[in-house]
Amino acid sequence: ECLAAQWARVYGGRREIAAVAPEWTADYEPGGRTLPDVSADVTLEELKAALSALGSGKAPGADGITAEAWRLASPRTARGILAIFNAMLRTRRSPQAFRSAVLCMIPKDASRPAWQLSNLRPISLLSVLGKAFEHVLLLRLRGAVRAALSPLQVFVGGEAGNTAFLTSGTLEMMEEARKARIPLHITAWDVCKAYDTVQPDVLVHALRRIGA
């Protein structure tokens, strides 16, 4: 059931909800939305955007090819990259080169012996193309999640400024509720180290159930 309808029943009608957040009172039917196809073929535009997002001056993986070099690739090479990406989507497999990393040990403190393990920070250098593919999937999944959420929900996708946006929106809603003299209930849920405590086998099982 739509949360707006539930709130309307509790607080005596949609007018009170509209007084706080009028843009949330529109009918919402999650089943009626068309979600983006995250498994569709990767386009040239997506590839260019992913390579641009990786930035410049970054160390490459074992192949030694930087993001700057891939951005200068010829149209024929770009088509070859797209063929690899789309084959990965169809087969749900990734090349070993994308799953391998060059491990570099960087000293933390130059004044301490470089051979001390406690003074070393491991850095994994991954394939630029592998990271570009991950970026394409990230943007697709982020769009799918946004499209699937109700307007009554807020999704923090990790972009800069979200904290300020949420704080501003919360204060605005509090002020509107105060003016309308109606109760306002706000629930915030922040799971500490959520991804560090997820059981991998459970996550894989859940993804398989939805066909991922």
Image (cartoon, rainbow, N blue to C red):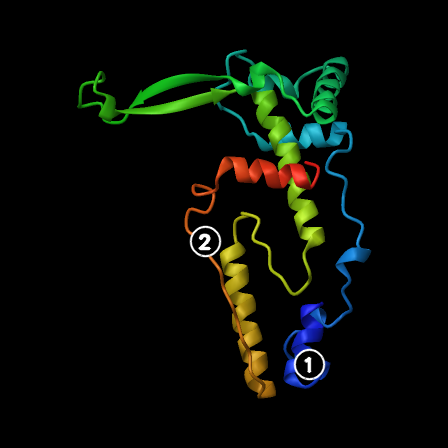
- What's the residue at 71%, 18% (across, down)? 84
Of residues 15 and 114, the one nearer the viewer is 15
Quote the CA–CA distance across marks 1 and 2.
30 Å
Of residues 19 and 210, the one nearer the viewer is 210
Q: Residues within 10 Å of mark 2 (few under 14, many from 20)?
A: few
Q: Residues within 10 Å of mark 1 (few under 14, many from 20)?
A: few
Residue occupied by mark 1: 9
Q: In this image, 190 relative to 181: left or right? A: left
Q: Amino acid at mark 2?
A: Val
Determine whether 71 is above or below 29 in the image. above
- What's the residue at 73%, 21% (across, down)? 87
Q: Amino acid at mark 1?
A: Arg
- What's the residue at 61%, 21% (across, down)? 129
Q: In this image, 130 relative to 196: left or right? A: right
SS at circle 2: loop
SS at circle 1: helix
Q: Which percent across, then down, holds residue 63?
A: 54, 11
